[in-house]
Image (cartoon, coloured by chain):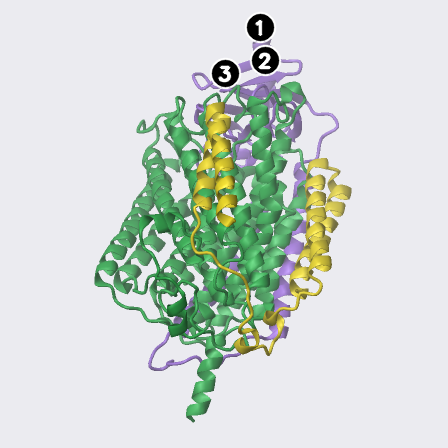
Chain colours: A purple, B green, C yellow
Amino acid sequence: MHGQTWPAIGSDQSAALADDWRIFTYGALAVAVLVWTLILVAAVRFRQSPRNPAPRSQKDANPPLEIAWTIAPLLLVIALFVVTYRIEAAVEARASAPQVRVAVNGYRWGWTFAYANGPTLDGTSAKPPEMVLPLGQTVALQVSSSDVVHSFWIPDMLFKRDAVPGRTSEFDLTPSKLGTFLGRCGEFCGLNHALMTFSVRVVSPADYQRWLRYEATQ
Amino acid sequence: MTAAAAARVTPPERHDLLSWITTTDNKRVGILYMGTTLLFMAVAGLLAMAIRTQLARPGATILEPHAYNQIFTLHGTAMIFLVIAPFALGLANYLIPLQVGAPDMAFPRLNATSYWMFLFGGLIVFAGAATNEGAASAGWTSYTPLSEITISTGLGQDFWIVGLAMVSVASIMAAINFVTTAFIHRAPGMTMWRLPIFTWEMIATSLLIFMAFPSLTATLLLLFVDRHLGGHVFDPAFGGSPILYQHLFWFFGHPEVYVLILPYFGVVSEVISTFSGRPLFGYTGMVLAAFAIAGLSMGVWAHHMFTTGAVNNPFFAFVSFLIAVPTGIKFFNWICTMWGGSIRYTTAMLYAVGFLMNFLLGGVTGVMVASPPLDFQAQDSYFVVAHFHYTIGGGSFFALFAALYYWWPKVYGWRLGERLGKAGFWLTFAGFNVTFMPMFFMGAFGMPRRVYTYAAGGALPLLNVIATAGAFMLLLGGILFVVNVVVSARRHEPAGDNPWHGYTLEWATTSPPPEHNFHALPPIRSARPLFDVEQAQQAKAT
Amino acid sequence: MKTALGLFVSSAIFTGTIAVVYWFIAHEPAGTMLLGFMSAALIVVALYMVFAERDADLYADDKDATMADAAGEHVGTYITHSPAPFWIGVALACVMLGLVVSPAAAGLGVVALFLLGGLLIVRSR
């Protein structure tokens, strides 16, 4: 099972999420390296020493510079917002006719997966449930909880959605990689929060149909 | 009044225990506050050591789940409510009257009351550990329905609620004092725009406390009503809403983290300015930025709720991104203060530069998690744990030590040793980064927060053991600080009135200051009164 | 006082504006009410400052004031010690614990507060 390492980016949505990660990580690192460099240059170059025994000036304002370092970050931040907005809209887009529907229910401490026109699977940490999904088809998930707030998290798909009692939260998932991916609860829910895992096994559409038929006989 | 005249009129200062219990003097209340927070810090730090020891290896059984849950709940609650915030309140207690040229706070009795309420509130929170089912164990955020009576059945949760209610009211009382003293009790010539930057940051912090803490008190009250008085405000089975709890809590919770950082921005500004020998660059911009941060921080609370699907993510993402702009302004101003200066690297200055290095990473990762798509992975994972430890730990905590080393000689009249101080700094800086840098990766790789264990496999075991090693380095750094205090107390190296060559009013009085803070005040014609005095003396000499 | 008043007024306008913008973007009642009441509270403080402190003329706000200008002015009496804060803390702790553990303790705390109040009134006469 894949998990606890570099995420596999296992869904169409997570490809867009990975873009967001890349843009923001490189952006953050670029800003950090620039400012760290400025800090270290200032810290080292202007140490008190025989060559630098006293401050060179008491100048404490430079209005054009101050305006520049207000406007530039503001523009950068607005650009980042546009990027974020577009990616979130793409990730949260819903298909009008999903091929698979699963109702997910979190509880202390396990998960129930109820497939529309399919089986209902249940499992706790002793035997975590496995959600089987077809590659390349859109899955509409509805997430809720029957007790406290949990969170349905698939790290390899860079996505989680909170399971809140009293409300149902919906989103689409389109698996793009074959494999078995680790799933976790992502909201502290008490004693066995750490053990509240599940797995997502992505198979070919043909294998998925086979699995559905098998489950129908159980 | 001259020193001699003051000595005739003022009764001698008492030093017995009763005088400390009944004191209303701003300096003593400040010392009580800061000393108490350092004790809470030691306890909360040891709790963290327990957490890191348990997490060093997958499947470890050093702590069983219920104990672990109490420990991280108390660690977070204590560090936020009983250490970082009240240390700043205590420091402000000590410094604001000195910095504005006042003999005491505007409401001395209210001031002391706030300390005792904070102390007893904090003790009540911890006293929950002695109850049947132990202390609160629903996290410092205490989300419902987890914290409702049906699930958190123990009294510990109630101790947490009432203890924090006292701390919340105490903080509001302290903020009232800071604002009133800064507005009304400034010395002649100390206009608002000549105030030291630390005092300005405390005014902004106090404004935040006024705006945010009432929501905390109300939320705690509502949670108590749900638990014991038949309420169902947050109970979905009866039409209540767990999401409402999150709105109410985070409306307080987000401004709270700016309460945790703004005072320390002020500390860093003072320290960098003094040890660079230059005035704070862009003083007006710094003040405006502080209020921009405070104001904007009221509008970002639901970025803690991005993964609920129940809030308007773009609105909160946009406002959260905006906060990066005034924060960036502050960074550029600090760098320009150092630029062209002649920097003396005392322990305090080292901690201030360490703050800059650490908080920068905390800040840019904050912009990262402000992007909802990124937050879908990072929320409730160790990525977020790393982010907030870099801001509060790498930031506030480092500035806290800068403040200790900087103002210690003023408070006690003797200095903390520089050799042990610097060794402690390097150990703490290295240990801090070794502990928290791996956590960014742990989170991205799928490790949730608030877990007592994790499975073997993947990168998590190695990353966790590295983090634990860093934690032991931090522990050593803490021990070095305590050793330094003891050794320096014995050595008792007299500090004099102005050991660091500072230019704000607290350095214009004795170390420690007399009971009414000043025997005499210099004329106040700028934000750096002692600099003006020095210039005038040099002009006279030539 | 102008700076201080400006602080409260601008904060009130700012939070009020965010409240309105937030309502139209998110239609979420809890946050809107919190922001709206926040703005109202700040307006209350600002109004107080306008009406009650309008004529406050502090030496502190005079750029060229000297210590001699304010000399001899009776600012107030700064007390240095009081038993009240500690006892308020103890009593409130009793009340809080009482809410949780036992009404008797809560009652004890309330009694302690009344005794303290009486003591302070007697001593101030």
Residue B483 % position (x, y):
25, 53
Q: Circle 2: is it few (<14), some (14-19), or many (20+) Cα within 10 Å?
A: some
* Secondary structure type for disc 3: strand
Residue A149 % position (x, y):
56, 27
* Secondary structure type for disc 2: strand
Q: Which residue is mark 1?
A: A217
Disc on res. B62: none
Name the amino acid, label 3.
Gly
Q: Nearer the viewer, residue A163 or C21?
A: C21
Disc on res. A120: 2
Q: Is residue B522 above or below residue B331?
A: below
Name the amino acid, label 2.
Thr
The answer to whether any part of residue A22 appears in the image is no
Q: Are marks 2 and 1 in contact (CB under 8 Å)?
A: no
Left or right of B424 on screen, residue B89 = right
User: For the point 61% across and 40% down, which residue is it?
Assistant: B215
Q: Quadrant of residue B507?
A: bottom left
